[in-house]
Image (cartoon, coloured by chain):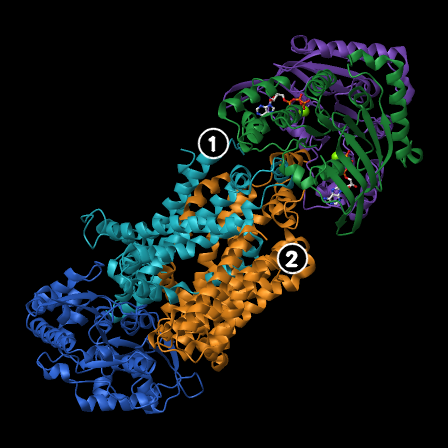
Chain colours: A orange, B blue, C purple, D green, E cyan
Amino acid sequence: MSQLQFFLALVAGGLSAAAFALSVVTPFEQGLLLKAFLALGFMSLIRFFLPLGLWADAALALLGAVALLTTIGAFGPTPAFFWMALVGAWLFSWLFVERLSKALAPRLSDNAGLGLLIPMVFGMALLVIWEVVTRGANVPPVLLPAPSMIGAQLANSAPILWADFVQTFIKSVLPGYAIGCLSGLVVAILVDRSPFLKAGLLPIGNFMSALPIIGIAPIMVMWFGFDWQSKAAVVVAMTFFPMLVNTVAGLNASSAIERDLMATYAADYWQTLMKLRLPAAGPFIFNALKINSTLALIGAIVAEFFGTPIVGMGFRISTGVGRLAIDLVWAEIAVAAVAGSAFYGVIALIERGVTFWHPSVRGGRA
Amino acid sequence: ADALTLQLKWVTQAQFAGYLVAESKGFYDAENLDITILPGGPNIAPEQVIAGGGADIIVTWMAAGMAARESGVPLVNIAQPFKKSGLMMICPAEKEIKTVADFPGHTLGVWFFGNEYPFFAWMNKEGIATDGSAGGVTVLQQSFDIQPMIQGQADCISVMTYNEYGQALDAGYGPDNLTIFNYTDMGNDLLEDGLYVLEDSLKDPAKVDAFTRFVRASMKGWAYAAENPEEAAQIVVDMDDTGAATLEHQLYMTGEVAKLVDPADAKLDPATYERTVKALLDQKIIKAEPVGAFTSVVTDGL
Amino acid sequence: MTAVVSAQNLGLTFKTNDGDVVALSDVNLTIDKGEFVSFIGPSGCGKTTFLRTIADLEQPTSGTLTINGQSPENARKDRAYGYVFQAPALYPWRTIEKNIALPLEIMGHSKSQQAERVKRTMDLVNLSGFEKKYPWQLSGGMQQRASIARALAFDADLLLMDEPFGALDEIVRDHLNSELLKLWDRTKKTICFVTHSIPEAVFLSTKIVVMSPRPGRVTDIIESNLPRERPLDIRETPEFLAIAARVRDGLRAGHSYDEDHI
Amino acid sequence: MTAVVSAQNLGLTFKTNDGDVVALSDVNLTIDKGEFVSFIGPSGCGKTTFLRTIADLEQPTSGTLTINGQSPENARKDRAYGYVFQAPALYPWRTIEKNIALPLEIMGHSKSQQAERVKRTMDLVNLSGFEKKYPWQLSGGMQQRASIARALAFDADLLLMDEPFGALDEIVRDHLNSELLKLWDRTKKTICFVTHSIPEAVFLSTKIVVMSPRPGRVTDIIESNLPRERPLDIRETPEFLAIAARVRDGLRAGHSYDEDHI
Amino acid sequence: MNRVLPILTVLLAIVVIWYVAAIGMNANWQNTLNTRAALTNVPFTDFAQQTWAQDRPVLPAPHQVIGEIWNATVALEITSKRSLAYHGWITLSSTLLGFVLGTALGVLLAIIIVHNEASNRSLMPWIIASQTIPILAIAPMVVVGLGAVGITGTVPRALISMYLSFFPVVVGMVKGLRSPEGIQLDLMRTYDASPWQTFWKLRWPAAMPMLFASMKVGIAISLIGAVVSELSNAAGGGLGVRLLTGSYNGQTIQIWAALFIAAALAAVLVMVVGFAETAVNRRMGARPA
Ligand SMILES: Nc1ncnc2c1ncn2[C@@H]1O[C@H](COP(=O)(O)OP(=O)(O)OP(=O)(O)O)[C@@H](O)[C@H]1O
Ligand SMILES: Nc1ncnc2c1ncn2[C@@H]1O[C@H](COP(=O)(O)OP(=O)(O)OP(=O)(O)O)[C@@H](O)[C@H]1O
Ligand SMILES: [Mg+2]
Ligand SMILES: [Mg+2]
């Protein structure tokens, strides 16, 4: 057991024990399941004498989550032991993840499925905590709705969400992203090609780096109309700079001796670029592609606050806030999060394939 | 002094002249009140702010207030300084739109973020589809200026009499080359800027008293603004933290707003209320007839 | 006979943050076509720097240098030479086979020609079977051999080789020495070869340049009169040993410190 | 006498995208305290891999290996050894002096101790005057010497040296050979030393391990009976030459290809 | 001098294109105006000048923007609420605070991710997801939520800047901290260096190029965050509020002036990071390219 695991196990067990004691002295009929979880959590302290499998922690975390979710409404004002049980359950899930990843570490590649379990557990824990806290502490739903409400809204509004997704992601983000990244790359190469342009264009590129979206969005609407074209233009403006900066840095990443080799072949500029400098810049370029994948989405959504046809994720979010349909807003946010993560994930996968040679991908093995 | 926070519906401008004047002329101090005025903006929903505890009183439109009430923010109207609506839809003459019957097939600019209800209620009444289907109109979420009209991106746009309409006049448009649809004139107006508080706060007599004093001082502010438009406009400009307000524009706005407000009467007119609620129900903006959504305890105490 | 490399009063000084380093000073040397010249000298005496100057990778700060009668820059643009660096400098994103094909791609050889040449040179340095491996999957000596193969894959008339066999064991080294001699004999290339092994220098060269450090200069140029045809056992002949002794003396003279320490 | 390194049936296989590479198979070897063991064998036979396994940088896939009676991991954590890699592996953002001080910083030596040791070892490898230079301002051989200095700067009882003198000329090499022998004699360190030079192996070692490739295995272990005190001219004695001949035979036997090519 | 000439050339090119574009983009409206005023056959030079002098142009001419900037900065007292310098300062202060916090958070997260496998697998996907949450949607909640507990002013805005700017730093630093070569890491292993020592003496210096590339992006995004946050918190002023109110009032020239100040601020900030990079490179003995 590592130090961290030891600590987690001790605190989780101890907290369960204390909460169990509290729950027994409080006169509550309800929450039997919760008491059962606390009792079992207490008992998990025997792990310091008898080894306990990591799946036992998984089971405890799961039981805790179920117990918490089923007993939320049962109390008037939420008692202290309820919150302690929440922390306890969370600690068990953390302990489980910690142990699982240690167990997986030596044979990661063979265990892609189990590897996915870890972020899922983390995500589930987050959702349970969110649900329990918002409902347990009576957070006004117009400030932060519980995940269950968001889920219900997701299911109810699927056609709207889909139409918004097509409008924003497919029509605005993808073309804008492609054009923005490509033009960033091209300008970076131009800048690199000519020292004159480098001196002249780079400071102006910096100038463009933070043209605030809310400033350019109205202007783009003025120029390109209300539909997706103006959103794509905003995305172009937002993704351009990260690509420019990273590519310029990446093109200088090849080592002196690698460049010397190309010089001895009298390779021309383009050959050196294609065969040496672009591959060597790969990690930097992917860095920008990854940052841009989320930035593009933010840009398109925010741009829709400034005039759109009445469809799109940003439109729905802004009107949703105005109408206090916050659960719909969060359903949109959930769609945005899934779309953005998937987008990022695809790019990260491509990165692994393309820059397999970089120490950060090979795991530093020489 | 009792400390109260007022969340405005929009940025600091003469639309709120009464409150700004009352603060600046010390009318609130005279009522032993300590008022903080928070400006709004396109991304600030006053209903959300009050639900989160960020304000005690908000200025909002009734449609938005009632919709919020259904979403679980128990708002109650305590006073209604704005008697009429300033909302209009204008179409440049060259678009050849003379009557509502000419709308189908055209693109109309509408403000959202809680300002869209009157438009949809109107279209609902006229039986014009807004979902993009054939024979209906195309709706655009309009930016908060008149650019869509100048650019020709929309055939008609929404304006407030006291703000964007003035911009249109400035830009060389006038009644002779515009077709104007005034919501009030058409009888399609929904109640605009009213004062709303949370239901719970009305259970506390001390609070009710403070609200009463607040409304009294505010109405005094409205009256002062109506009588001294120049001074009021200057006050607005001075109180604008962003420094973007111009005297000329605020003066115009003060004058136009004065036409909508009745400084002598803060009471909510039940008839207009009923009409507003009915329009909201017809349009399914709210599902059930609201109960206890307005009170006269404050205005009765004036 | 024409001079392939001709250096007159060549000097090169590196500017560094804590003062200048004179890497080459007053170097005079002529290398004729078809010669095999070895450079030998203590570590840091400027051998690499001299090769890099020939290759137009460093700019001399004084004196003149011509390659095939033209400036180093033009010679480089003519692809007049192949260079084996002291470090392997393989590109990590290319397999060994692709690394060796790199110059061929750049010089526009056809795919089939590339394949044929890559195969031939990989056989020559005994790397067959490792075509699809990446550089980091190879041992140090194997990487060095891959970089030799890369320089031999295209036919430059001038070969600049900076300690190409340093990381190889005696047997492979003997083998590659013989192969290199055969190649030289067959193709009449001009070869500049940096080595630390005196026997290797004597065995391979028609001319041995002894250098000494601080500042880097040429202290001795030894013309070898050994026959062009050189079996491995030539290394036991008295002529061979005589030349080797002269090189060793030159080398020792260049070392300033050995008296104090040993 | 206690075994410092003890390997039984040690095997190590690398998994690569196009099949497994058996780098070590069935290696049995015991190294006692105070021994000087040289490893010699063709390029790619697994010498580096074996040293890395001792250093706990690779995990054996079969067999057992103990260092000072404990697991390689524990030995590493005890800082039981100093390692000179085949490549210099200097950190480019540190000056030479800072690079050499790196292990001392990590092991918590005082500033003055660091300064003193850095100076001593830099003198030993004859790099004085280059304290403030960055690695890329040094020649290949100088970088290698810096990496030797770095490993010698702290006093490990076991030294693992992977071709430390590969890029050095004969004179410096002789000098460093003698220095290393003196150090070994004085401090009774145990040394594992990879080299491609047969004379060097014979001159330095008490035991010579001959390896052969594909799969990497130990083909011969030669105990040297030369006296501990070894002047340079011992290299002309018949005992010396006899051992060298045996090593050469072992080495040649490991080469599968030389018949076909030469 | 050899830096100034290229910049001037590029600037000149931009200005020329700009003036030409202004004629094209404003022509439509100018035609309407002229028709209305019954002006016909306006010579081209006059027409061009008209398009450069509109009150609410689609694209204001450069001199209009410069004039507005001049009027809103130099011609006013710096503390005046109308002064762009005053608003620029408000935005700058939340940008800088947000950037510092964001960089610190980003580096911290990257360190955790690189050193702890469980965090690597569980944290990273959620950090990414967090970035896809449209900031403008949660900004009001952040502002209202913090306002309810009494935190107002620069801090909530800076938090929003931080939220945007930490991401490029995490992504870049994870890559950077993992970039040391195997042999460099092996060296540390042979010394049994603690993770902390390996971090300071190897991973951190090796990550410098990535850190600076990320910080340049980060500071620019931080400024965007500051501006966006002002939309949800209009009380305090700032360039974002200026942009916004300019846009309500249809004051295109005012929007462009604020935009210019914001962009200039960004350029200066990015350049400052660039200077820091050069200085650090020099200290680290980097080989001149
Ligand atoms: N990371 C790795 N992945 C795959 N194969 C490897 C890896 N490292 C080494 N090998 C293979 O293991 C074998 C032994 O390599 P090693 O580096 O031990 O050789 P060596 O004896 O040190 O050779 P040299 O004298 O050339 O340095 C080689 O065939 C090499 O290709
Ligand atoms: N880029 C550089 N900047 C500053 N000094 C340099 C640079 N390159 C080489 N030197 C210095 O120039 C001198 C000669 O270096 P060079 O690499 O030519 O030596 P060498 O003869 O090849 O040595 P070795 O046999 O060790 O490879 C050395 O003192 C070295 O420190
Ligand atoms: Mg050299
Ligand atoms: Mg090796």
Residue type (three-letter) at the residue carrying disc 2 = Leu
Based on the displayed image, in which of its 4 quarters is residue C140 positioned? top right
Q: Chain of mark 1?
A: E
Which residue occupies the foreground of this view, D106 or B149?
A: D106
Residue drawn at 31 percent across, 58 percent down: E240
Residue A104: mark:
2
Q: Secondary structure at mark 2?
A: helix
Determine which quarter of the picture holds residue C71: top right
Residue A100 at x, y percent in the picture: 61, 59
* Chain identity of mark 2: A
Instruction: Using residue B287 as the reference point, say whether residue D260 is left or right of it.
Output: right
**In terms of depth relative to the viewer, which is nearer, B56 or E11?**
B56
Residue B22 horizontal/vertical position (percent): 10, 68
- Inter-mark Cα distance, 2 to 1: 41 Å
Quarter of the rendering containing residue C12 = top right
Q: Which residue is mark 1?
A: E283
* Depicted C50 relative to depicted B94: above or below: above
* Viewer-proximal residue among E17 and C142: C142
Q: Is residue E92 left or right of residue D146?
A: left
Q: Position of residue B118 (x, y in %)?
A: 29, 83
Return the x and y of residue B94 as percentages of the image width and height.
31, 78
